[in-house]
């Protein structure tokens, strides 16, 4: 999996009390791949996963019209007693 980014927004902070975490992943990734990746990378046990596909946005630069990539947002529920620390982006 190339792009795994933990998604943080005010709505997402409500999930933390339920031991749920959200990630934006590539559209082509399967649930099994994502579950294995989360369990190996963070050393946690996943008990449930929900996902929804988010459309890309239309972008325009002068006369050229394009769009950004579609992506999938995964909501991952962990077993009680496990947690994932918040990920931070590097500042350059």
Image: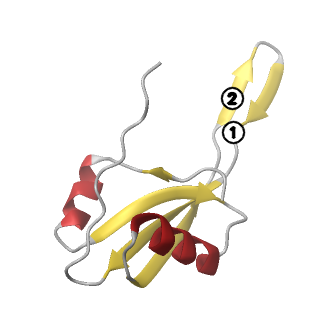
Against 80, is 29 above or below?
A: above
Image quarter for residue 31? Answer: bottom right
Assess whether mark 1 and mark 2 are in contact (beta carbons under 8 angstroms).
Answer: yes
Image quarter for residue 27? Answer: bottom right
Residue 7: x percent and y percent?
Answer: 41, 50
Secondary element at image label 2? strand
Looking at the image, the residue that sits furthest to the top is 62
Kindly identify the residue that appears in the image at 66 percent across and 59 percent down: 1
Disc 2 or disc 1, which is closer to the eye?
A: 1
What colour-coding does the image apply? secondary structure
Residue bearing the label numbered 2: 59
Residue 87: x percent and y percent?
Answer: 36, 47
Crowd band around label 1 with a 10 angstrom C-alpha radius: few (<14), some (14–19), many (20+): few
Q: Nearer the viewer, residue 34 or 75?
A: 34
Q: Nearer the viewer, residue 39 or 56?
A: 39
Residue 83: x percent and y percent?
Answer: 26, 68
Kindly identify the residue that appears in the image at 22 percent across and 56 percent down: 13
Kindly identify the residue that appears in the image at 40 percent across and 65 percent down: 42
Residue 63: x percent and y percent?
Answer: 83, 16
Label 2 and label 1: CA atoms lie apart by: 7 Å
Looking at the image, the residue that sits furthest to the left is 17
Against 84, is 46 above or below?
A: below
Q: Earlier in the sequence, mark 2 or mark 1?
A: 2
- Asked whether, in this view, residue 12 is left or right of residue 40, the answer is left
Crowd band around label 2 with a 10 angstrom C-alpha radius: few (<14), some (14–19), many (20+): few
Image quarter for residue 76? Answer: bottom left
Kindly identify the residue that appears in the image at 65 percent across and 46 percent down: 56
Dot label at residue 68:
1
Against 7, is 16 above or below?
A: below
Secondary element at image label 1? loop
């Amino acid at each position: 999996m190339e792009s795994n980014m933990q998604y943080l927004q005010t709505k997402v902070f409500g999930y933390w009390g339920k031991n749920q975490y959200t990630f934006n992943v590539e559209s082509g990734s399967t649930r099994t791949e994502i579950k294995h990746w989360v369990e190996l990378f963070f050393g946690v046990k996943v008990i449930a996963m929900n996902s929804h596909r988010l459309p890309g946005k239309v972008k325009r630069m002068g006369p050229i019209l394009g769009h950004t990539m579609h992506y999938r947002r995964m909501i991952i529920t962990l077993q009680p007693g496990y947690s994932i620390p918040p990920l931070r982006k590097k500042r350059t």
